[in-house]
C-alpha cells in the first residue's frame, strides 16, 4: 500500500524492536564461539570477498564475519576506510580503487557483503563496475520501500551536526533497481533499525531474499547469515 506521495506506507521499526537491539551483546560472543566450528558449511576456493560496515561502524565490527569466512576458505577483506559516516566523493574514489586492486590481485571478480548502509554502497559499486563484482549480499540494508523507514535518522543528524537529513527521493528510486549481478538480500523481521520490508530486493532473475532471525546490529555476527553467504559463495 502507498500513501499520497506514491511511496509505500512503511514505518520505522517500533520502539520495542529498537530496544531489542541490545541482543547483539549476547549474539556476538555466541557467534564467535559457534563460528569456530564451521562443520557442514560449504568451503570456498580462495575467491575474494570484501565486507563493508554499516553507518558508524568500521572494520572491527565486521572482523568476526570476515574471520569465519577465512576459515571457510575465502579471501575476506575489510573496506579499510575507517568509520562509515556516509558516502563522500573521496570515499567513492577510494572504494573504486580498492575494488579494482582486489580484483586485479586475485584475477577474479570480488563478492561484496554490505551491512546496513554498507549494502547500499555495495550495490552501487556493483552497478558502476559490474565486471569486477561476482555477487552482492546486503544485510539489513535500506535498499527499497522508503528511505526514511528506519531509526537511523537521529544518528545521521548527530553525524551532520544537527542538520536535518536531506533525502534524495529520485536518487533513492533509481537505486531500488538492483545492479546487474546476482544479489542476495538478507533481512530479519525483528530488525529494530531498518524496516524489514525495506531490506528486500524486488523480484528479478538475479535477485533473492533470505530471512534470518536476529537483531540488526547482530547481522554480522549471525550464524544463519554466515550459512546463507557460505552456501551462495560455495555454489559459484
Image (cartoon, helix red, strand yellow):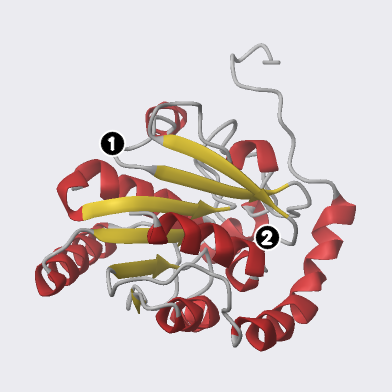
* Residue drawn where x is 75% and y is 57% of the image: 213
Rendered image: mark on residue 21: none
Which picture quadrant has residue 70? bottom left
Q: Residues within 10 Å of mark 1 (few under 14, many from 20)?
A: some
Rendered image: mark on residue 180: 1
Q: Is residue 71 above or below residue 7?
A: below
* Residue with the most extreme right position: 16
The answer to whether residue 115 is seen in the rendering is: no
Secondary element at image label 2: loop
Q: Quadrant of the N terminus?
A: top right
Give coordinates of residue 82: x percent, y percent.
39, 78
* Residue with the most extreme top position: 4
Give coordinates of residue 236: x percent, y percent.
33, 54
Q: Nearer the viewer, mark 1 or mark 2?
A: 1
Secondary element at image label 1: loop
* Alpha carbons under labels 1 and 2: distance apart: 26 Å
Give coordinates of residue 114: x percent, y percent.
45, 59
* Residue with the most extreme front position: 40
Please tell me which residue lies in front, 209 or 100.
209
Q: Is residue 188 above or below residue 227?
A: above
**Closer to the N terminus: mark 1 or mark 2?**
1
Q: Is residue 30 above or below residue 124?
A: below
The answer to whether residue 138 is seen in the rendering is: yes
123 lies left or right of 85: left
Q: Residues within 10 Å of mark 2 (few under 14, many from 20)?
A: many
Please tell me which residue lies in front, 168 or 114.
114
Please tell me which residue lies in front, 73 or 32.
73
* Residue drawn where x is 66% and y is 56% of the image: 154
* Residue drawn where x is 78% and y is 65% of the image: 21
Q: Which residue is mark 2?
A: 216
24 lies left or right of 123: right
Give coordinates of residue 67: x percent, y percent.
47, 84
Amino acid at each position: 500500500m502507498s500513501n499520497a506521495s506514491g511511496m509505500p506506507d512503511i514505518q520505522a521499526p517500533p520502539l520495542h524492536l529498537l530496544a531489542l537491539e541490545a541482543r547483539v551483546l549476547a549474539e556476538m560472543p555466541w557467534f564467535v564461539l559457534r563460528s569456530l566450528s564451521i562443520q557442514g558449511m560449504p568451503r570456498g576456493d580462495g575467491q575474494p570477498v570484501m565486507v563493508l560496515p554499516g553507518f558508524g561502524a568500521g572494520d572491527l565490527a565486521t572482523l568476526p564475519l570476515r574471520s569465519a569466512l577465512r576459515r571457510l576458505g575465502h579471501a575476506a577483506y575489510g573496506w579499510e576506510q575507517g568509520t562509515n559516516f556516509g558516502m563522500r566523493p573521496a570515499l567513492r574514489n577510494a572504494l573504486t580503487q580498492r575494488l579494482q586492486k582486489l580484483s586485479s590481485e586475485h584475477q577474479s571478480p570480488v563478492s561484496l557483503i554490505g551491512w546496513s548502509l554498507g549494502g547500499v554502497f555495495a550495490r552501487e559499486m556493483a552497478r558502476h563496475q559490474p565486471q569486477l563484482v561476482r555477487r552482492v549480499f546486503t544485510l539489513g540494508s535500506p535498499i527499497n520501500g522508503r528511505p526514511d523507514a528506519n531509526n537511523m535518522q537521529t544518528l545521521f543528524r548527530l553525524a551532520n551536526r544537527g542538520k536535518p537529513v536531506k533525502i534524495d527521493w529520485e536518487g533513492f528510486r533509481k537505486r531500488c533497481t538492483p545492479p546487474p549481478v546476482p544479489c542476495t538480500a538478507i533481512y530479519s523481521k525483528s530488525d529494530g533499525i531498518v524496516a524489514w520490508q525495506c531490506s528486500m530486493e524486488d523480484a528479478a532473475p538475479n535477485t533473492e531474499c533470505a530471512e534470518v532471525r536476529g537483531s540488526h546490529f547482530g547481522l554480522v555476527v549471525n550464524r544463519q547469515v554466515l550459512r546463507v553467504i557460505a552456501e551462495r559463495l560455495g555454489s559459484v
